[in-house]
Image (spheres, rainbow, N blue to C red):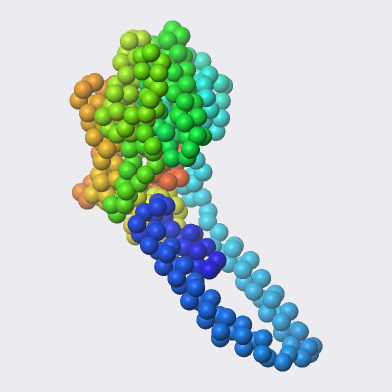
Amino acid sequence: HWPLFAFFNGTLTREAGSLGESTARVSLIILSLLLAYGLNRYVEEPIRRIEVKARMKAVGLMIIGSVAVVGTTIGMMHVTAVEDHGLGRLVNYGLHYECDFTRTFKPTPQCQRGNTPEFLVWGDSHAMHLVQGMTDGGEKSPAALVQATKLSCSPLFGMAPVFVGGKGAYDWARDCMTFNASVLNYLRQADTPMTVVLSSRFNHLLRRFDDGTPVNVVEGMLVEDADGNRHLAPADTATSIVGLKKTIEAIRAMGKRVVFVAPPPASGFDIGRCTERLVEGLPVIGGARDCNITVRAYHATRRDVLDLLAAIEADSGIEVIRFDRYLCNGDSCKSRVGGIPIYGAGDHLSQTGSAHLGKAISLLERIRGKS
């Protein structure tokens, strides 16, 4: 069974848990049992019944065969080794991997560019991957910024998702709430004009794959009321709108400007991995043949997130900067532009892709409100 699952895992680009991925794994289990039976009956048992006499010729052939197998394996590893091609398949942490803060935020030299930050980038991994687009997008005056980010922690004031995972999930939710409170505290103490750039994937709203399979990733939202009491609320769009509006209102109350950058188009497969294998000419299972995202699948899998951003844009008058207006055309959204891979790990922008998009849509100037 090991070669079957190793090949499948190596070529799969669809997200774990989807209907197609689960069906394929069940089929592989059945196939591995059939192959095991055939191997035992037609190979192992006949060999056990053979009377083997140790001869120099047989031993020599066995050694030669073993060397040939090892040599072929090593050769194939070199031939099929995947090069980077600017894909940046590692997580794009923005300025530095230490910018994935744990419980509280405090500016560090690794997570700040420039002595007087013009911007605060706040959110989860989809805020992290904006940094190259703001600092390496070819602008005449690159951004001076400070990065306040925590993986999977959306910038929702007074609430955080409780992901499925027992007691540890509640501890993480409390840490996320503490982190967001510390970011607001930093903003209150900042005595310089600053634009706050918010972004998030809103993982708790991703309830379906592109094949329609429901996703159960959260127990609910841990919400803190005005008296400091905490309770579990539905992890839905309405609850998230309340949290995001509180964040925006708190920022504006300090006299600071706020914009939101939407996550890039994505669907139910690992776009970065698909692109990597496509560039190398390797087989792909579970993704589009050209690794592009269909607009239909994008809207289906990200419907709740898109609804949230539309509601916030209408209710709060906040500008939502979107990449899909550049990447999507007709029925599909591009994963590569001019041969440049846009995505790195999963549905995150690679460093090269972020810098390219930053230049292509004049991201920094749009954030500054000048385009």
Can residue 134 be seen? no
Q: What residue lies at 69% left-to-right and 76% top-to-bottom?
A: 66
Q: Is residue 209 above or below residue 105?
A: below
Q: How many marks?
A: 0
Q: What residue lies at 38% left-to-right and 13% top-to-bottom?
A: 227
Q: What residue lies at 47% left-to-right and 40% top-to-bottom?
A: 165
Can residue 210 be seen? yes
Q: Nearer the viewer, residue 112 or 142?
A: 112
Instruction: Say whether residue 67 is left or right of residue 302.
Output: right
Q: What residue lies at 40% left-to-right and 59% top-to-bottom?
A: 22
Q: Nearer the viewer, residue 292 or 368?
A: 292
Q: In x, y percent, where is residue 209?
A: 32, 49
Q: In x, y percent, where is residue 340?
A: 40, 47
Instruction: Say whether residue 52 is left or right of residue 250.
Output: right
Q: Residue furthest top?
A: 191
Image quadrant where residue 125 sits? top left
Q: Is residue 348 above or below residue 289?
A: above
Q: Nearer the viewer, residue 249 or 330?
A: 249
Instruction: Say whether residue 24 is left or right of residue 300.
Output: right
Q: In x, y percent, where is residue 12?
A: 43, 58
Image quadrant where residue 249 sits? top left
Quadrant assignment for the C terminus: top left
Q: In x, y percent, where is residue 46?
A: 62, 88
Q: Is residue 1 above or below residue 41?
A: above
